[in-house]
Image (cartoon, grey):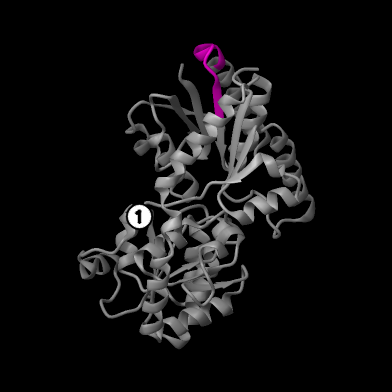
């Protein structure tokens, strides 16, 4: 009798949590599990998800990242109803709900409790609260995570930093949570021959310029305006450098205004969503990430696999991938001056760039995504064997 596994995520946009979730639902053994993927609408990866064989796709109206009491309640009721239907449809087989991201994690786990789903797993791909929020807001979100943590049979962290934070804040019990790495398909990013000049020409980048690249959604978490400010600082010392930002989102208009105000439009390329990230990294010289919080930034791993040095923020699990001075440099979020100085130094020292890039490639194997699905399957089997198949 196959268990039913439903993965729930807020939105299928381009991002690490979404990429890992798609990899998981694609790879789960269909001889042991019947698999579904539920998400809010409008994600750029929705069409890709629909191409996965033997995968049931459901769009959840009202499920979105922004806080909206009316829409959140609507999504909660829909999730509760759908989970009740899943319990009836697959009885007597057990149903496992596996949630990802903060909004889907909170609403999904509340709905599972109301529907009587006994096996609930949540993966922390970072947290929905951060130190930049007003204290009451941060405490409210921590309280919600504590509540829904008690409704979870098992919790997964993508980094040891997230595991320790969850236990310290009372979101999880030590025996309830484990680390399952947020990995990447390493071979996709290993450098291989390609037309570097043609790609640079397409991007509008000079063949002879040093290219500093950031790959991120244009949302507050990623702090893309800091990348523009960093670029302006670097260009004062390295005027031949160019900057590319691959991604899109709500902050694009504000970012475009700032780029114009800083007078760097000719050297700063907003690329929108890109599906050729490996080639984009191979065409670059340094990878930057200005995030304010993360679980474990997959783009750090992608850069290492591509042989690029990283200059980024020391957030959550970042230090588990980037070793300061060995394969990149980490700074506190918002330290634009520090990051700009490190980028400038790397642009002026090709030998140092190569040394850091080679060091990153040499130690990235532990983050291979091929470990992800077997680890999750083992977790599901462990929960099923514990005898909690049905409420």
> Where is residue 169 shown, x and y percent of the image?
75, 50
**Residue 93 magenta-highlighted:** yes
Q: Is residue 66 above or below residue 339?
A: above
Tell me what residue is drawn at x 52 percent, y 52 percent. Answer: 250
The picture places residue 302, in percent across and down from the top left corner, at 40, 60
- Name the image quarter holding residue 57: top left
Residue 342 higher or lower than 366, as above or below: below
Residue in the foreground of this view, choosing between 239 and 33: 33
User: Which residue is found at the position 68% from the left and 53% from the top?
Assistant: 164
Q: Which residue occupies the foreground of this view, 54 or 135?
A: 54
Position of residue 151 in the picture relative to residue 345 (left or right): right
Q: Please, which residue is most extreme toward the right here?
A: 136
The answer to whether residue 200 of the structure is visible from this angle is: yes
Which portion, as a residue range, is magenta?
A: 87-97
Judge whether residue 12 can be spotted in this image. no
Splitting the image into 4 quarters, where does residue 10 fall? top right
Percent coordinates x, y for residue 359 in the rendering:
41, 72
Q: Which residue is mark 1?
A: 274
Q: Does 181 sit above or below residue 328?
A: above
């Amino acid at each position: 009798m196959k268990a039913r596994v439903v993965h729930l995520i807020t939105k299928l946009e381009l991002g690490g949590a979404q990429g890992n979730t798609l990899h998981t639902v694609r790879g789960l053994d269909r001889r042991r599990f019947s698999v579904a993927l539920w998400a809010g609408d409008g994600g750029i990866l929705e069409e890709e998800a629909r191409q996965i064989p033997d995968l049931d796709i459901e769009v959840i109206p009202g499920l979105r990242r922004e806080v909206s009491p009316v829409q959140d309640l609507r999504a909660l009721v829909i999730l509760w109803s759908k989970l009740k239907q899943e319990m009836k449809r697959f009885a007597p087989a057990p149903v496992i709900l596996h949630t990802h991201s903060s909004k889907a994690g909170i609403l999904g786990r509340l709905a599972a409790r109301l529907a009587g789903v006994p096996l609930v797993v949540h993966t922390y791909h970072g947290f929905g609260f951060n130190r930049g929020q007003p204290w009451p807001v941060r405490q409210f979100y921590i309280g919600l995570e504590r509540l829904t943590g008690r409704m979870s049979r098992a919790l997964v962290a993508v980094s040891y930093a997230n595991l320790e934070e969850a236990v310290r804040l009372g979101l999880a019990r030590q025996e309830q949570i484990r680390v399952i790495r947020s990995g990447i398909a390493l071979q996709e990013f290993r450098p291989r021959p390609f037309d570097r000049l043609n790609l640079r020409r397409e991007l509008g980048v000079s063949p002879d310029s040093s290219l500093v690249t950031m790959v991120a959604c244009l949302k507050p978490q990623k702090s893309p305006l800091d990348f523009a400010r960093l670029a302006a600082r670097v260009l004062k010392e390295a005027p031949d450098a160019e900057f590319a930002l691959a991604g899109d989102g709500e902050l694009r208009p504000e970012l475009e205004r700032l780029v114009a105000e800083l007078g760097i439009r000719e050297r700063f390329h907003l690329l929108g969503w890109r599906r050729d990230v490996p080639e984009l990294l191979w065409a670059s010289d340094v990878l930057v990430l200005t995030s304010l919080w993360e679980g474990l930034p997959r783009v750090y791993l992608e850069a290492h696999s591509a042989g690029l040095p990283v200059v980024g923020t020391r957030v959550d699990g970042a230090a588990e991938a980037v070793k300061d001075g060995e394969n990149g440099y980490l700074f506190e979020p918002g330290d634009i001056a520090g990051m700009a100085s490190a980028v400038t130094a790397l642009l002026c020292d090709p030998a140092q760039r190569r040394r850091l890039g080679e060091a990153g490639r040499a130690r990235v194997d532990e983050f291979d995504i091929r470990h992800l699905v077997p680890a999750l399957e083992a977790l599901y089997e462990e929960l099923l064997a514990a005898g909690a198949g049905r409420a």
